[in-house]
Amino acid sequence: MVALDTSVANVALPQIAGSLSASSEEATWVLTSYLVANAIVLPITGWMSLYLGRKRFLMASIVVFTVSSVACGAAFSLPVLILARIVQGASGGALLPVSQAVLLESFPPVQRGEAMAVYALGVIVAPIVGPTLGGWITDNYSWRWVFYINLPVGVLATVLTQMLIEDPPYVRGGKGGRIDYVGFVLMAVSLGALQLILDKGQQDDWFSALWIRWSTGISIVSLIAFFLWEIRVKHPIVDIRILANRNFSIGILMATLYGIILYGTLVMLPLFLQELMGYPALQSGLAITPRGVGALFSVTLAGRLVRRVDGRLMIIGGFLALATAGFMLGRINLEISMASVVLPNIIIGAAMGFIFVPLTTIAMGSLPNERMGTATGLYNLMRNMGGSIGIAIVTTMLARSAQAHQSILVSHLTPYEPAYREWLEHLRQLFLSRGDIVTATRKAYGVMYHLLVEQSTLYAFVDNFRLLGYVAFLGIPLAFLFKKAGKPRGG
């Protein structure tokens, strides 16, 4: 539910804006509010599990998430919808790391790879299916049903959690103690400001905007103060000493890199298919769906191989596959067939499984169970922040690279270029049969400019896909920094 709701509402934004009498820019807060609240809650889930009791905290989060989902669907104005999305994002932020911690602790180390394979099905496949599902629901029913679909799942999850989940001994019944208000406020300010910068930066031309500069300073100062405070306080809300574990530190760094590539390609492909290839929203979503097929296959296989094969080799293979897919997409043009998009997507999906399963297993493998809640919270936070960074990078590069290519290409559109004169005259004669010479000339120039923008935008997409291919290579040397773990044992 949580992973799905990060992307399922994206394609419904125009309908939401129209239904609630809001502008498209105002409607984007439906996405931003969810992500900001989600980011703030993720790191403190370990502490909340200890303070309230994990089962109690998990059930409360499911109930609040489900109720807030219904409130989103029933919202009668944009402020009400944004408020419901904040509550939904905050409660949803707890569900991913807590469920991951439950899985990691419920199985002995020898079976954790398979447990993470099951977990990966939701985390990887849901954001891929989200846009397609959201588009289909919006087209055939209403945008409100994008949120209402969480109700039956939430009710079922609540019942099953009550029946099947148990607290481990060290969190049973919850623990009292003082709440680290200072740490929470510093963390919330830093992460909230950073998420807003990443979401709205390109729209306001980054550091040209005064609020971006102020927000960046506030985020950095708050983050430094947060680390200094958490090191000294007796009962920190986030135990950052966990970063001293080498495998975990390398793991969250690679998870950030993984998030950049995953969400970067996930944003660019629908844009390319809709803006340049003319695909409808539903068809562009369906073109991404094969990624889920590749992920479904790879996570199942990776869950079994992680017992027998060095996880570092699987991670290296996964990043090599991501780089290959990036360079394959870097060869696109405006005459490609669907197969040119489907095959790289299958490769990306397969790579995700071979990275996610062993990466999570290695990063968490040497941590004691008592620290699992904090670890999963930070791990999921950094993967999500990587996604936000990736989206910010590709949208910025897309706009600016298109402008750069346009300035280069336009230098060839001069009367001194024979090809340009030939095309212009051909178009003028074509339109002359339907009007006067002035109108025909104006239309011919319009067509040439449209082709110029189209080709420069295509080059920008090519640059971005190749950039993500090079970024994928950064994951290979990082894999060698992991300490080699012994063969997992039962227990």
Image (cartoon, helix red, strand yellow):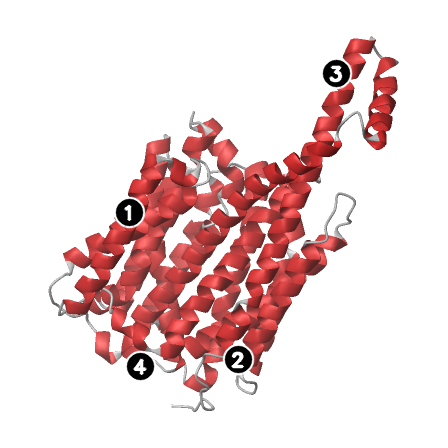
Labels 3 and 4: the sequence-earlier one? 4
Q: Position of residue 32 (x, y in %)?
A: 39, 43
The residue under the point 68% across, 54% down is 330
Q: Which residue is mark 4?
A: 368
* Residue 62 visible: no
- Contact, mark 3 vs mark 4 (Cβ under 8 Å): no
Image quadrant where residue 61 sits: bottom left
Asked if the residue at tag 4 contacts the one at tag 1, i.e. Cβ–Cβ closer than 8 Å, the answer is no
What is the number of the mark on residue 312? Answer: 2
Residue identifier under label 3: 442
Distance from Cα at disc 1 to Cα at disc 2: 37 Å
Q: Quadrant of the N terminus?
A: bottom left
Q: CA distance from mark 3 to mark 2?
A: 60 Å
Q: Which residue is mark 1?
A: 217
Mark 1 and mark 4 lie on one chain; the one further toward the N terminus is 1
Residue type, label 3: Arg
- Give the Cα separation between the discs numbered 1 and 4: 36 Å
